[in-house]
Image (spheres, rainbow, N blue to C red):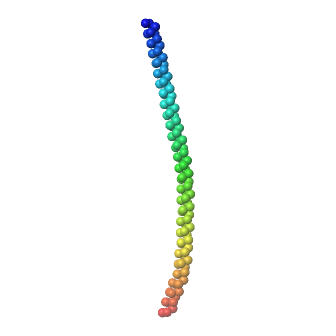
């Protein structure tokens, strides 16, 4: 009977060690999983920052290009208006001179 009790005690002791080892392994796996998630988050943040930098650069280049096109178009329109004003100014000046000389 004593041998049976000792056998059961040894089994209980082994079961306790197995449970301790299982708990330790569970903690290791939990920590490993947490670290992997953190690493994944850091990697994703870096990737997103890289993509945002590229998009920001593209947007700035596009904006600059569009702004240059608008400035060029406005300058052309100003030149056309200036030319039209000069042409009309000569005609208006002639009409004024004609009216003055008619009197």
Q: Nearer the viewer, residue 23 or 88?
A: 23
- Residue at image coords 49%, 34%: 34
Indicate the quadrant containing the N terminus: top left, top right, bottom left or bottom right. Answer: top left
In this rendering, the answer to whether 36 lies above or below 97 is above
- Residue at image coords 53%, 38%: 39
Q: Nearer the viewer, residue 97 or 86?
A: 86
Q: Nearer the viewer, residue 79 or 12?
A: 12
Where in the figure is residue 68, as x and y percent of width and height?
56, 63
- Residue at image coords 54%, 45%: 47
Where in the figure is residue 41, as x and y percent of width and height?
51, 40
Where in the figure is residue 54, as x and y percent of width and height?
56, 51
In this rendering, the answer to whether 103 lies above or below 45 is below
Where in the figure is residue 19, as x and y percent of width and height?
46, 21
Q: Looking at the image, how many numbered discs can be counted on the residues? A: 0
Q: Residue furthest top?
A: 1
In this rendering, the answer to whether 3 lies above or below 87 is above
- Residue at image coords 55%, 77%: 83
């Amino acid at each position: 009977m004593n041998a049976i009790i000792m056998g059961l005690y040894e089994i209980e002791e082994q079961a306790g060690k197995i449970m301790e080892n299982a708990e330790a392994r569970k903690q290791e796996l939990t920590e490993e999983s947490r670290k992997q998630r953190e690493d994944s988050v850091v990697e994703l943040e870096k990737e997103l920052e890289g993509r945002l930098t590229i998009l920001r650069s593209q947007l700035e280049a596009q904006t600059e290009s569009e702004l240059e096109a608008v400035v060029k178009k406005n300058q052309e329109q100003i030149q056309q208006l200036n030319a039209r004003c000069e042409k009309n100014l000569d005609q208006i000046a002639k009409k004024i001179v004609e009216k003055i000389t008619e009197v």
